[in-house]
Amino acid sequence: IAIMGCIVNGPGEMADADFGYVGGAPGKIDLYVGKTVVKRAIAMEQATDALIDLIKEHGRWVDPPVEE
C-alpha cells in the first residue's frame, strides 16, 4: 500500500504497490490498483474507508488478529 501526496510524481513512485492513493484536487484523493486509477476525487475524510473497501473488493483484505 502506498500513500502519496503529489499527483505529479505520486503515481510513478507508487507503481510497484498493489494499492494506493494519491492526493488530487485540494481535499481529494484518487485511488489506484497498481498503476491504474480506479476512483477519483474521494474526500480525504473518506479516504481510509474507501481504500479498505477497495482492498476488500479485490479479496486482499486480512482482518487484524483479535486480542483477548
Image (cartoon, helix red, strand yellow):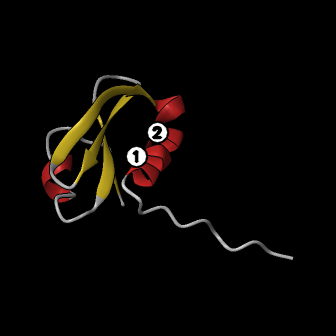
Say left or right for 46 vs 6: right
State the image coordinates of residue 30 (x, y, percent, origin top left). 30, 35
Q: What kind of residue is marked 2? A: Ala
Q: Quadrant of residue 66?
A: bottom right
| Quadrant of the rendering where the N terminus is positioned | bottom left
Q: Quadrant of residue 63?
A: bottom right
Badge 1: few (under 14), some or many (20 or more) residues near its Cα, within 10 Å? many
For disc 2, the marked residue is 50
Q: Secondary structure at mark 2?
A: helix
Residue 54 got which mark?
Answer: 1
Judging depth in this view, the residue of 47 and 60 nearest the camera is 60
Say left or right for 18 vs 54: left
Q: Is residue 41 above or below residue 52?
A: above
Q: What kind of residue is marked 1? A: Leu
Dots 2 and 1: beta carbons under 8 Å?
yes
Say left or right for 15 vs 25: left
Q: Is residue 46 above or below residue 10?
A: above
